[in-house]
Amino acid sequence: MKTATRTRLQLLIFVAACCVSHFACAQFYFENNDGYRLWQKYDTIEDKVTRQQMREKLKTLNISGNSATTKIIREELKYALTGLLGHPPRLSQKLEDQQLIIGTPETLPKKVYSQLNPLEKLGEEGYRIRSLTVQGKNLTVIIGNSDTAILYGTYHLLRLIQTHTNISALNITEIPKIDIRVLNHWDNLDRHVERGYAGESIWDWHKLPDYKYQRYYDYARANASIGINGTVLNNVNANPDILRPEYLQKVAALAEVFRPYGIKVYLSINFSSPHIIGGLKTSDPLNSEVAQWWKSKADEIYQLIPDFGGFLVKANSEGQPGPGDFGRTHAEGANMLADVLEPHGGIVMWRAFVYANEKNEERSKQAYSEFKPLDGQFRKNVLVQSKNGPIDFQPREPISPLFGATPQTPIMMEFQITLEYLGLSTHLVYLGPLYEEVLNTDTGAKGKGSTVGKIIDGSLFNNTISGMAGVANIGSDRNWTGHIMLQSNWYVFGRLAWNHEQTAKDIANDWIRMTLTNDHETVNTISNMMMASRETTVNYMTPLGLHHIMGTGHHYGPGPWVNNLGRDDWNPVYYHRADSQGIGFNRSATGVNAIEQYHPELRQLYAKPETTPDEFLLWFHHLPWEYKMKSGKSLWDELTHHYYQGAENVKQMHKEWLKLESKIDPHPFNQVKMALEIQEQEAIWWRNACVLYFQQFSRLPIPSGLEKPQGTLAEYKAAQFPYAPGQGG
């Protein structure tokens, strides 16, 4: 009998025996193993020895407490262990019968708790998993200072079981390195998702607050399983209507669903809301009536949602209103909001994605120029939320110079999980290596070892609050992310937000084992594909530091020729600056001098072409086509080889996947197979279009050994995609 079929029968029997609850009616759509269950796919462990060993350790369990969260823990363990081990665990109140004990210091038996002190350093979210011997009996214990903490610990134990890890001698202590770990949903009230490639928004605002989809609960389960503790429900280009009473009732309904999973809700706000929906003549943050309006609105929100997280603000960027409209600074705008949230324990996440062409400053420099002078002027409950790079979620960018530049102001990381500039949802691109590359970059802000990770977790400058946000790739598609492999980006974001010192490869291996297969050889094959996928994509899209050469609006496909947009810095030609003399953007001291914003170590590294790493060469320097690279090739030859290598690597990745047909369940196998077919075609499209375009400036031949690009440049330039996903946002 097939594993999926066997598991389906077992779980249906289990469900029939369960009382009805939000969890018991959870996602039992296993016919096609279509990706809905994400990494919480609790199929039966096929290895009988491993399964039996786990059974012996987990026959009986006790979860103390009767909160909504402890009820979730009981249901999750029943559901998971029934699927993984083939039978439900037995609940027992007698210590001599128990094998798995889960609780807090207030609820655990004293004989157990006494062996686990002290717990103060765990805080409210940290947990400990220990193998103990009590009265001659071997126990596995999960303890934390809150019910949310033991929920996190429960999911950690389930991960160990799913990945076939030996659980006989556990001594695990986990404490999150970052306080605020949130998803940013760029979702509109009409369910359109800006830069979303997995269907409509999962929030059905029309049916809320009364109709709560099972998907909301499963969303919360998935987030809790990777330590995400917050969600911003709406687009940063915010509709003021989200603050109207009828919509706050809908927000409160979602908050009620998420609360037992340790997840707070946040809202993006439109800075001009006092004027647009409040009827005031102004939204000036220093106007007393405006401040009172926001205070009243905050009081209203917290009356409905006592644990409301706070506001995310996009201000004075891409046409959004902000304090600059009234001659006020970002700090003055943020502080006004912070003051009304502070009594309730709320925070302000103020985005640093600001650029304005009237300032006549190169775009990559503008965030630093705006926020560096304001360091120390923000309230303690304000975080400045910066994208990882200085432009806009490119396949590769150097880090934003803001990291390390504001020691008195906590900088919150903003990563993109959705693939706005990386092939939408049809390209297999695992973002773990990108996140890892950024977090491990040494800024030199306080000498060697001043990594971005240490800046955003608050440890480098002793900040009292820290945060990491990810722009979600979640939608209404059955598999949540439009491409089952892209679930891994949601997963790795959560794991790294909890602990950025983990490796992207280890996290990828866990995700594969939990989602696709535990076959060792197959895991290695898929892991290698995933780990190479981001570099592969950079090669066929934007090698050697090229950036922002995607199509207009939808950012789909190549568009290095675009030069007709309303602002210079919206046009790809602005960024690559290809001409007969060479290619690249001179951001060195002889150009726009963006390198001056970095600390000396990085400034010196990027100052000259010969010291600049190849991956950032054309980001910082405009160089002749015949410039000699470290490889010995000319710049033209090197650039062309990268484009061809990227396309070839996708072809090889496709071949490797086809070899796994007998190792992967049919539905996920075919999902990925179809997407890889698209990716292979589009990698060649990118290669051909870019090489032909840049060749007209270099006037050099295609390097020997490489096939001539198919088609003509005119044909590639003529292609239009008015209805591509992401258009209009």
Image (spheres, helix red, strand yellow):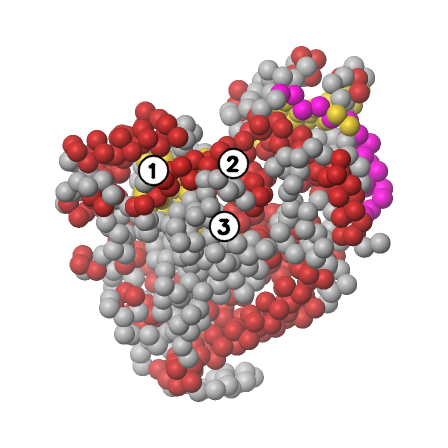
- Quarter of the image for residue 326 reads top left
Bounds of the magenta segment: 46-65
C-alpha gap between disc 3 and disc 2: 14 Å
Give the mark, 3 or 2, whose residue is nearer the N terminus: 3
Q: At numbered mark 2, what does the secondary structure look like: helix, strand or loop?
A: helix
Numbered mark located on residue 245 in the image:
1
Q: Position of residue 634 (x, y in %)?
A: 44, 77
- Do residues under tags 3 and 2 come within 8 Å of each other at their CB atoms? no
Q: Position of residue 531 (x, y in %)?
A: 59, 57
Q: At numbered mark 1, what does the secondary structure look like: helix, strand or loop?
A: helix
Give the mark, 3 or 1, whose residue is nearer the N terminus: 3
- Mark 2: give few (<14), some (14-19) or many (20+) Cα within 10 Å: some
The amino acid on which the numbered mark 3 sits, given as a three-letter code, is Ile
Residue at image position (85%, 44%) is 48
Residue at label 3? 202
Residue at image position (73%, 51%) is 518
Residue at label 2? 257
Viewer-nearest residue: 613 or 373:
373
The amino acid on which the numbered mark 2 sits, given as a three-letter code, is Val
